[in-house]
């Protein structure tokens, strides 16, 4: 269980660092979209972890962004 928590924390930290790097290049609208995407990905990872689903690898190329 501790290993799962550490892995989840590492993924969250990498995501946060990516957001900080991209945030420096964005205007206000871009920031809102970026933060929404970040929250959605974090929520999805939390759901997977709570349901004992192992993801194959979270990276930007595996995240689909689409307009609603």
Image (cartoon, rainbow, N blue to C red):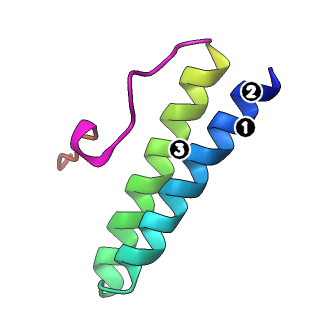
**Image quarter (top left, top right, bottom left or bottom right) of the N terminus:** top right
Is the C-beta separation of discs 2 and 3 under 8 Å? Answer: no
Residue beneath disc 1: 6
Question: Residue shown at 44%/67% (left/top)?
Answer: 19
Calculate the distance from the C-alpha at mark 2 to the C-alpha at mark 3.
Answer: 18 Å
Q: Where 26 sits versus 9, above or below?
A: below
Q: From this viewpoint, which residue is outermost toward the front? A: 3
Question: Residue shown at 61%/13% (left/top)?
Answer: 51
Residue 49 spot, x, y in % from top left: 61, 23
Q: Nearer the viewer, residue 18 or 35?
A: 18
Q: Where 10 sits versus 55, above or below?
A: below
Asked which secondary structure carries label 1, the reply is helix
Is the C-beta separation of discs 1 and 2 under 8 Å? Answer: yes
Asked which secondary structure carries label 3, the reply is helix
Q: Nearer the viewer, residue 17 or 66?
A: 17
Crowding around mark 1 (Cα neighbors within 10 Å: few <14, some 14 to 19, many 20+) is few
* Residue 53 falls within the magenta-colored stretch: yes
Is 37 positioned to the left or the right of 10 in the image? Answer: left
Residue 37 spot, x, y in % from top left: 38, 54
Q: From this viewpoint, which residue is outermost toward the left? A: 67
Which portion, as a residue range, is magenta? 52-62
Is 42 positioned to the left or the right of 59 in the image? Answer: right
Q: Which mark is residue 42?
A: 3
Q: Which mark is residue 3?
A: 2
Question: Residue shown at 29%/48% (left/top)?
Answer: 60
Q: Earlier in the sequence, mark 3 or mark 1?
A: 1
């Amino acid at each position: 269980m501790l290993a799962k928590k550490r892995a989840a924390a590492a993924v969250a930290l990498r995501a946060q660092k990516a957001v900080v790097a991209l945030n420096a290049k964005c205007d206000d609208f871009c920031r809102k979209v970026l933060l929404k995407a970040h929250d959605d990905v974090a929520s999805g990872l939390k759901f997977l972890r709570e349901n004992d689903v192992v993801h194959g690898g979270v990276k930007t190329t595996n995240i689909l962004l689409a307009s609603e």
